[in-house]
Image (cartoon, rainbow, N blue to C red):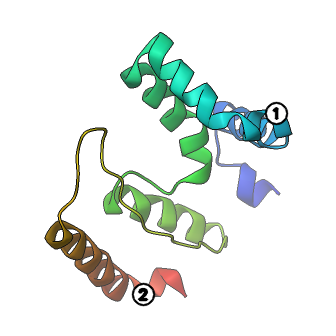
């Protein structure tokens, strides 16, 4: 356990515990979309997204981009923790990706995987 948790800050561990406990609650899971949308209306998109990224996002995502994913991948790899990478891109509200942009993003990810294979095995 020391190997896995010893290098993490207490605040990160508490965040993980809170997120996992919230995800155990059916009422939270079933109403998460409503809670998110209501929060955006009351607190605004920027604050809501900042809180989500800093809480659930820290627990359940590997990063906002390939560089942050790589940093997390190396950190987990150093602790002997296997990583599953599930790449996705999301458009911001009001944005749309063209098929060419999606193809380019997919190509960048494939190239990333090819050059970083040693961390993925």
* 107 is higher (above) or lower (below) than 40: below
* Mark nearer the N terminus (1 vs 2): 1
Marks 1 and 2 in Cβ contact (< 8 Å): no
Q: Position of residue 66 (x, y in %)?
A: 34, 63
Label 1 sits on a secondary structure element that is: helix
**From the viewer's perspective, is residue 76 above or below residue 48?**
below
Residue 49 drawn at (x, y percent): 44, 30
Out of 73 and 56, give the one closest to the viewer: 56
Between 17 and 11, the one nearer to me in the picture: 17
x 49%, y 67%: residue: 74
Question: Please, which residue is most extreme toward the top here?
Answer: 42
How many residues crowd around disc 2 within 10 Å: few (fewer than 14), some, or many (20 or more)?
few
Q: Which residue is painted at 55% across and 44% down in the image? A: 58
Q: Nearer the viewer, mark 1 or mark 2?
A: 1
Give the image quarter of residue 108: bottom left
Within 10 Å of disc 1 (Cα), the crowding (few <14, some 14-19, many 20+) is few
Report whether 76 appears left or right of 43: right
Q: CA distance from mark 1 to mark 2?
A: 40 Å
Question: Based on the displayed image, in which of its 4 quarters is residue 99 positioned?
Answer: bottom left
Q: Is residue 95 visible?
A: yes
- Judging by the rendered image, the residue that carries numbered circle 1 is 27
Q: Position of residue 120 (x, y in %)?
A: 51, 82
On the image, numbered disc 2 is attached to which residue? 117
Q: Secondary structure at mark 2?
A: helix
Does 87 sit above or below residue 61?
below
Q: Which residue is drawn at the image coordinates 46% and 16% (left, top)?
A: 41
């Amino acid at each position: 356990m020391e190997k896995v948790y010893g290098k993490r800050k207490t605040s990160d561990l508490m965040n993980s515990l809170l997120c996992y406990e919230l995800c155990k609650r059916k009422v939270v899971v079933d109403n998460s979309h409503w809670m998110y949308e209501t929060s955006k209306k009351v607190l605004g998109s920027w604050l809501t997204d900042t809180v989500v990224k800093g809480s659930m996002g820290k627990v359940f995502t590997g990063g906002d981009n390939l560089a942050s994913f790589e940093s997390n991948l190396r950190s987990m790899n150093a602790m002997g923790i296997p990583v599953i990478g599930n790449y996705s891109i999301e458009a911001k509200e009001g944005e749309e990706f063209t098929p060419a942009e999606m193809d380019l993003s997919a190509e960048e990810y494939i190239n990333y995987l090819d050059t970083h294979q040693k961390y993925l095995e």
